[in-house]
């Protein structure tokens, strides 16, 4: 298992749009609930994506664990580009998972990759063109990747519904 607050994601890089692998590293210190970002240059799209994820995190993390106080800490998210594909465009869901992992001190499963973006209301965006962008693996692999892309969305939706049911039962 990895370190709490470290998450891997796959996203389209800016400006070329090619898929790349990225690592999000996070750090938490005593503070007042502020977020700082690094490792993404001047890319405003990824910064906005992570800021929205942070606001969702602050508004909802106590619903998962009432004992947590996100405003008692300051947070730093650093994006590491691993494939020389440019800064990622939308990685909000991975940012949210990194923050949740960090504050709860729980590591993610090894070899886990978090895909997608998240809105302020918690809606997870679709993973677009995963099979097309990884199409260099041949036609049978492309079909399997298309199924994987659809399956990831189903798992995400099902998991979100299960989490919502658990949270509602705790209220």
Image (tube, helix red, strand yellow):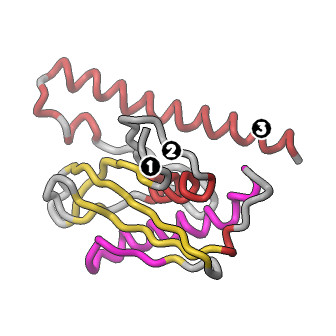
Residue 95 among magenta residues: no
Q: CB of mark 3 within 8 Å of CB of mark 1?
A: no
Residue highlighted by disc 1: 3
Tell me the element at label 3.
helix
Tell me the element at label 1.
loop
Q: Residue at x 31, y 47 (%)?
A: 10
- Please determine whether, in this image, residue 89 is positioned above or below residue 1: below
Q: Residue at x 44, y 33 (%)?
A: 152
How many residues crowd around disc 2 within 10 Å: few (fewer than 14), some, or many (20 or more)? some
Give the Cα separation between the discs numbered 2 and 1.
5 Å
Q: Is residue 170 left or right of residue 111?
A: right
Residue 67 sits in quarter: bottom right
Tell me the element at label 2.
loop
Give the Cα separation between the discs numbered 3 and 1.
26 Å
Q: Residue at x 49, y 51 (%)?
A: 4
Main SS, magenta region, reads helix
Q: Residue at x 31, y 28 (%)?
A: 146
Of 133 and 170, the residue lying toward us: 170
Q: Which image quarter holds the N terminus?
A: top left
Q: CB of mark 2 within 8 Å of CB of mark 1?
A: yes
Q: Is residue 140 left or right of residue 114?
A: left
Residue highlighted by disc 3: 166
Residue highlighted by disc 2: 107
- Please determine whether, in this image, residue 31 is positioned above or below residue 7: below
Residue 49 among magenta residues: yes
Q: Which range is magenta?
A: 36-64
First in sequence: mark 2 or mark 1?
1
- Please determine whether, in this image, residue 101 is positioned above or below residue 169: below
């Amino acid at each position: 298992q990895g370190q709490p607050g470290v998450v891997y994601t796959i996203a389209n890089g800016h400006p070329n749009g090619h898929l790349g692998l990225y690592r999000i590293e996070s750090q938490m210190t005593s503070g007042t609930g502020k977020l700082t970002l690094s490792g993404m240059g001047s890319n405003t799209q990824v910064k906005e994506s992570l800021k929205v994820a942070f606001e969702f995190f602050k508004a909802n993390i106590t619903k998962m664990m009432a004992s947590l106080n996100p405003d008692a800490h300051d947070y730093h998210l650093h994006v590491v580009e691993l494939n020389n594909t440019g800064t990622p465009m939308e990685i909000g869901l991975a940012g949210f998972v990194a923050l949740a992992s960090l504050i709860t001190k729980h590591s993610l499963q090894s070899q886990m990759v978090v895909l997608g973006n998240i809105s302020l209301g918690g809606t997870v965006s679709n993973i677009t063109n995963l099979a097309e962008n990884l199409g260099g693996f041949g036609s049978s692999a492309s079909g399997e990747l298309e199924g994987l892309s659809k399956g990831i969305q189903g798992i995400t939706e099902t998991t979100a519904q299960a989490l919502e049911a658990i949270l509602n039962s705790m209220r």
